[in-house]
Image (spheres, helix red, strand yellow):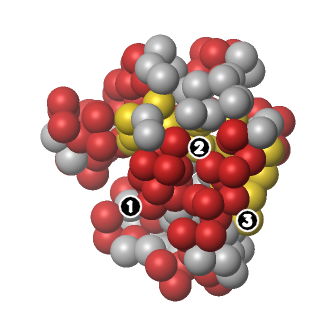
Amino acid sequence: MAAHQLPLVLIGPMGSGKTRVGRRVAKALDVRFIDTDKVIAAQHGSITDIFETHGEAHFRTLERQAVADALREEAVVSLGGGAVLDPESQRVLANHTVIELTVTAEAVLARMNTAKRPLLKDGPDAWQRIYDERREIYSRLATVTFDTSHVAISRIADDIAAWART
Protein backbone atom coordinates (compact mmCIF):
# COMPACT_ATOMS: atom_id res chain seq x y z
CA MET A 1 0.00 0.00 0.00
CA ALA A 2 1.16 3.52 -0.69
CA ALA A 3 2.52 5.70 2.09
CA HIS A 4 1.55 8.76 0.07
CA GLN A 5 -2.14 9.47 0.32
CA LEU A 6 -4.35 7.83 -2.30
CA PRO A 7 -5.42 8.51 -4.89
CA LEU A 8 -2.14 8.94 -6.73
CA VAL A 9 -2.97 11.12 -9.74
CA LEU A 10 -0.95 11.00 -12.97
CA ILE A 11 -0.92 14.11 -15.14
CA GLY A 12 1.07 15.11 -18.19
CA PRO A 13 0.86 15.58 -21.93
CA MET A 14 -0.68 13.17 -24.39
CA GLY A 15 1.63 10.25 -25.02
CA SER A 16 3.67 10.62 -21.82
CA GLY A 17 2.63 7.14 -20.66
CA LYS A 18 0.02 7.98 -18.02
CA THR A 19 -2.18 4.97 -18.77
CA ARG A 20 0.63 2.43 -19.20
CA VAL A 21 2.53 3.67 -16.15
CA GLY A 22 -0.65 4.03 -14.10
CA ARG A 23 -1.75 0.45 -14.71
CA ARG A 24 1.64 -0.86 -13.57
CA VAL A 25 1.80 1.39 -10.50
CA ALA A 26 -1.71 0.36 -9.45
CA LYS A 27 -0.78 -3.30 -9.80
CA ALA A 28 2.43 -2.82 -7.80
CA LEU A 29 0.51 -1.04 -5.02
CA ASP A 30 -2.43 -3.49 -5.22
CA VAL A 31 -5.01 -0.77 -5.80
CA ARG A 32 -7.53 -0.01 -8.54
CA PHE A 33 -6.52 1.86 -11.71
CA ILE A 34 -8.83 4.50 -13.18
CA ASP A 35 -8.24 6.21 -16.53
CA THR A 36 -10.68 9.12 -16.76
CA ASP A 37 -10.59 9.12 -20.57
CA LYS A 38 -11.60 5.44 -20.59
CA VAL A 39 -14.39 6.13 -18.06
CA ILE A 40 -15.76 8.90 -20.29
CA ALA A 41 -15.55 6.72 -23.41
CA ALA A 42 -17.29 3.81 -21.64
CA GLN A 43 -20.15 6.07 -20.52
CA HIS A 44 -20.50 8.44 -23.49
CA GLY A 45 -18.80 6.93 -26.56
CA SER A 46 -15.43 7.62 -28.12
CA ILE A 47 -13.70 10.86 -27.26
CA THR A 48 -13.19 11.59 -30.95
CA ASP A 49 -16.97 11.27 -31.51
CA ILE A 50 -17.74 13.47 -28.48
CA PHE A 51 -15.42 16.18 -29.83
CA GLU A 52 -16.87 15.93 -33.36
CA THR A 53 -20.53 15.76 -32.31
CA HIS A 54 -20.72 17.94 -29.21
CA GLY A 55 -17.47 19.93 -29.17
CA GLU A 56 -14.58 20.30 -26.76
CA ALA A 57 -16.58 22.28 -24.16
CA HIS A 58 -19.04 19.40 -23.73
CA PHE A 59 -16.17 16.93 -23.43
CA ARG A 60 -14.52 19.10 -20.75
CA THR A 61 -17.77 19.09 -18.74
CA LEU A 62 -17.87 15.29 -18.85
CA GLU A 63 -14.18 15.20 -17.97
CA ARG A 64 -14.60 17.49 -14.93
CA GLN A 65 -17.18 15.07 -13.50
CA ALA A 66 -15.05 12.01 -14.28
CA VAL A 67 -12.08 13.61 -12.50
CA ALA A 68 -14.15 14.54 -9.44
CA ASP A 69 -15.55 10.98 -9.23
CA ALA A 70 -12.13 9.34 -9.65
CA LEU A 71 -10.54 11.49 -6.95
CA ARG A 72 -12.92 9.99 -4.40
CA GLU A 73 -11.37 6.54 -4.91
CA GLU A 74 -8.36 4.89 -3.29
CA ALA A 75 -6.71 4.25 -6.63
CA VAL A 76 -4.08 5.28 -9.13
CA VAL A 77 -5.82 7.75 -11.46
CA SER A 78 -4.68 8.77 -14.93
CA LEU A 79 -6.11 12.07 -16.16
CA GLY A 80 -6.47 13.08 -19.78
CA GLY A 81 -3.82 15.58 -20.86
CA GLY A 82 -6.26 18.51 -20.81
CA ALA A 83 -8.08 17.66 -17.58
CA VAL A 84 -5.85 20.11 -15.71
CA LEU A 85 -7.24 23.03 -17.75
CA ASP A 86 -10.43 23.13 -15.68
CA PRO A 87 -10.08 25.57 -12.74
CA GLU A 88 -12.28 23.42 -10.50
CA SER A 89 -10.19 20.33 -11.26
CA GLN A 90 -7.04 22.35 -10.50
CA ARG A 91 -8.50 23.38 -7.15
CA VAL A 92 -9.41 19.81 -6.21
CA LEU A 93 -6.04 18.43 -7.40
CA ALA A 94 -4.21 20.82 -5.05
CA ASN A 95 -5.26 18.53 -2.18
CA HIS A 96 -3.97 15.30 -3.77
CA THR A 97 -0.70 13.54 -4.54
CA VAL A 98 -0.07 14.48 -8.17
CA ILE A 99 2.61 12.80 -10.28
CA GLU A 100 3.63 14.65 -13.42
CA LEU A 101 4.98 12.61 -16.32
CA THR A 102 7.12 14.63 -18.72
CA VAL A 103 8.37 13.60 -22.14
CA THR A 104 10.17 15.14 -25.10
CA ALA A 105 8.36 15.81 -28.36
CA GLU A 106 10.63 13.38 -30.20
CA ALA A 107 9.90 10.53 -27.79
CA VAL A 108 6.15 11.08 -27.70
CA LEU A 109 5.70 11.47 -31.43
CA ALA A 110 7.47 8.15 -31.96
CA ARG A 111 4.84 6.47 -29.71
CA MET A 112 1.58 8.12 -30.67
CA ASN A 113 -1.16 7.36 -33.12
CA THR A 114 -2.29 10.92 -33.83
CA ALA A 115 -5.39 9.68 -35.68
CA LYS A 116 -6.86 8.70 -32.29
CA ARG A 117 -6.06 12.09 -30.72
CA PRO A 118 -8.64 14.70 -31.80
CA LEU A 119 -6.54 17.66 -30.63
CA LEU A 120 -3.65 16.47 -32.84
CA LYS A 121 -5.55 16.21 -36.09
CA ASP A 122 -3.61 19.22 -37.40
CA GLY A 123 -0.28 17.40 -37.18
CA PRO A 124 2.62 16.76 -34.82
CA ASP A 125 3.45 20.43 -34.25
CA ALA A 126 0.14 20.65 -32.43
CA TRP A 127 1.53 18.35 -29.69
CA GLN A 128 4.33 20.79 -28.82
CA ARG A 129 1.97 23.79 -28.88
CA ILE A 130 -0.52 22.03 -26.60
CA TYR A 131 2.23 20.88 -24.21
CA ASP A 132 3.73 24.37 -24.07
CA GLU A 133 0.29 25.82 -23.22
CA ARG A 134 -0.21 23.33 -20.36
CA ARG A 135 3.34 22.85 -19.03
CA GLU A 136 3.11 25.51 -16.30
CA ILE A 137 -0.15 24.02 -14.98
CA TYR A 138 1.33 20.51 -14.87
CA SER A 139 4.38 21.82 -12.99
CA ARG A 140 2.35 23.85 -10.53
CA LEU A 141 0.05 20.92 -9.66
CA ALA A 142 2.81 18.30 -9.41
CA THR A 143 3.95 16.82 -6.12
CA VAL A 144 6.75 15.01 -7.98
CA THR A 145 7.88 14.68 -11.62
CA PHE A 146 9.20 11.69 -13.59
CA ASP A 147 10.46 11.91 -17.18
CA THR A 148 9.37 9.07 -19.47
CA SER A 149 11.36 10.09 -22.56
CA HIS A 150 14.23 7.59 -22.43
CA VAL A 151 13.38 5.17 -19.62
CA ALA A 152 11.36 1.98 -19.95
CA ILE A 153 7.76 2.32 -18.79
CA SER A 154 8.29 -0.61 -16.41
CA ARG A 155 11.21 1.21 -14.74
CA ILE A 156 9.22 4.44 -14.41
CA ALA A 157 6.34 2.50 -12.82
CA ASP A 158 8.73 0.75 -10.40
CA ASP A 159 10.28 4.10 -9.46
CA ILE A 160 6.87 5.68 -8.84
CA ALA A 161 5.65 2.72 -6.78
CA ALA A 162 8.84 2.87 -4.68
CA TRP A 163 8.41 6.63 -4.24
CA ALA A 164 4.75 6.18 -3.29
CA ARG A 165 5.69 3.76 -0.53
CA THR A 166 8.05 6.28 1.13
| Residue 28, x across and y down, in percent | 50, 50
Q: Amino acid at mark 3?
A: Asp
Q: Residue at x 61, y 44 (%)?
A: 11
Q: What mark, if any, has residue 125 been given in the picture? A: none
Q: Amino acid at mark 1?
A: Arg
Q: What mark, if any, has residue 117 been given in the picture? A: 1
Q: Is residue 88 visible?
A: yes
Position of 163 relative to 149 (above/below):
above
* Comes first in the chain, label 3 or label 2: 2
Position of 72 relative to 147 (above/below):
above
Q: Nearer the viewer, residue 129 or 16?
A: 16
Circles 1 and 3: CB atoms closer than 8 Å: no
Query: Tag 3, which secondary structure?
Result: strand
Q: Residue at x 38, y 35 (%)?
A: 32
Q: CA distance from mark 3 to mark 2?
A: 12 Å
| Residue 90, x across and y down, in percent | 67, 24
Circles 2 and 1: CB atoms closer than 8 Å: no
Residue under numbered circle 2: 10
Q: Quadrant of residue 88?
A: top right
Quadrant assignment for the N terminus:
top right
Quadrant assignment for the C terminus:
top right
Residue under numbered circle 3: 147
